Amino acid sequence: MTYTYYRRYRPSPKRTSFKSFFWLVLILVVVLLLLKGCVSVVSSLLKDREDEATLTLNKGSAEVVEWGQTESQDVADAQLLLAGDTVQTGEDSVVTLTFTNGTTVMLDQNSKMTFSKATLTDTAQTLQVDLLEGRAFVQQSPEDENQPTLQLHTDVMNIESMSATYLTSNQADREYIYGFEGQAVVNFVDRAQDDSVIETVTIDKGKKAILTDEVEQKLLARESVTLSGEAGDDLMGDSFIAFVNGETSMLGTAEETTPPEDEATTTDETTETPVVETPETTTPVSTLQIQVTSPGLNSTIQKSAIAIEGAIVAGTADYVTVTWSGNGNPYTLAGFKAGGTSFRYVADASYGNFKVGANTFTVVAYAADGTVSNTVTVVINGEF
């Protein structure tokens, strides 16, 4: 007898993609959570940095009294200034405070300023500095309107602006503000009455507001006073403004005038003729102005690399060049975009543009129409 065997057909189990899909979704969820965590950490770190400023010693000497301390310490280059700290410059000295929102504050000699507080809430984003004495040149140009704005307080003025460049002073006999670019809103306040606002003025480019002792007394007495006017050439020859702008003055050019005949000085043979010094010829003012904010114009470092940072303080630049004394070849900054307000150049021994000893860097900006800015020279001594 012949038997025939038949293999029972057993269908192969169907493969399902559910498990693969499940693991894919799980991996994606984990990656997204990690990315969210990284973004949260970075945002937190950036938020923490908003209440600090980088302090650069441009020339001379300066001291810092940290919050809660009574003794001062010498300023170190690229030192951090935190809320509550106070910086004071010495004779013939200049320092620059650079905030995370791009604002820079340059302090003149014999000036004192406190980084009083940082208000970083959902409803208020402000940094406040108090100019206790001396003068400050402020350039506010935040790239993001959501970043904190800077408020500068003097004895009588509260100055605030989203984007402005101005010079302000708090001295024993007077206070003032001169506008260079943009608009600054000035609230004249009564500190004795909970900072109540007496009057508000807007300082545009080329405008000024000056408070002498007499005007301040009338203001506090609520009498009618004129607070603003034309700046004219008040600051012509000002050494601090010259330093800020690379040894070039701003706010117009002084006109040559001939004194009236009744004011002319007459002498006879017995009168000694006074010796009159011939004034130095000033460089014509360019509509394009730059400044180097870090490091100082003459610095010494113990490392093989350093960044030279600066700003366009007037006019619009198409490109910026930096020439190193080591080769004499102008280098056009690739990272600077036409119309930008700040620039950065890295000098690094590994790049071949920095060496031991004296290194001279010459910075110049150019406008689209061919206008050339003032020249800023930075000397950095490498000791590495």
Image (spheres, helix red, strand yellow):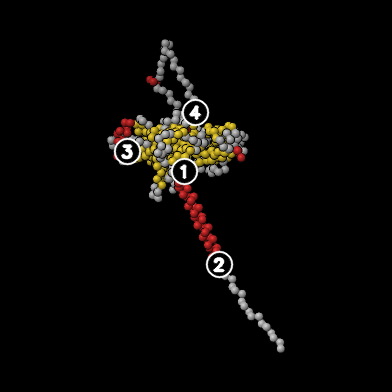
Contact, mark 4 vs mark 3 (Cβ under 8 Å):
no
Which residue is at the front of the view, 10 or 3? 3
Q: Amino acid at mark 1?
A: Thr
Mark on residue 191?
3
Which residue is at the front of the view, 118 or 2? 2
| Position of residue 343 measured from the top left corner of the image (x, y, whole percent) | 52, 41
The image quadrant of residue 159 is top left
Q: CA distance from mark 3 to mark 2?
A: 71 Å
The residue that disc 1 covers is 100
Q: Earlier in the sequence, mark 2 or mark 1?
A: 2
Q: Earlier in the sequence, mark 3 or mark 2?
A: 2
| Position of residue 325 measured from the top left corner of the image (x, y, whole percent) | 59, 33
Label 1, secondary structure: give it.
Answer: loop
Q: CA distance from mark 4 to mark 3?
A: 42 Å
- The residue sitting at the right extreme is 1
Q: CA distance from mark 4 to mark 1?
A: 35 Å
Contact, mark 4 vs mark 2 (Cβ under 8 Å):
no
Task: Locate the N terminus by quadrant.
Answer: bottom right
Determine if residue 360 is in view.
Answer: no
- The residue sitting at the front extreme is 1
The residue that disc 4 covers is 282
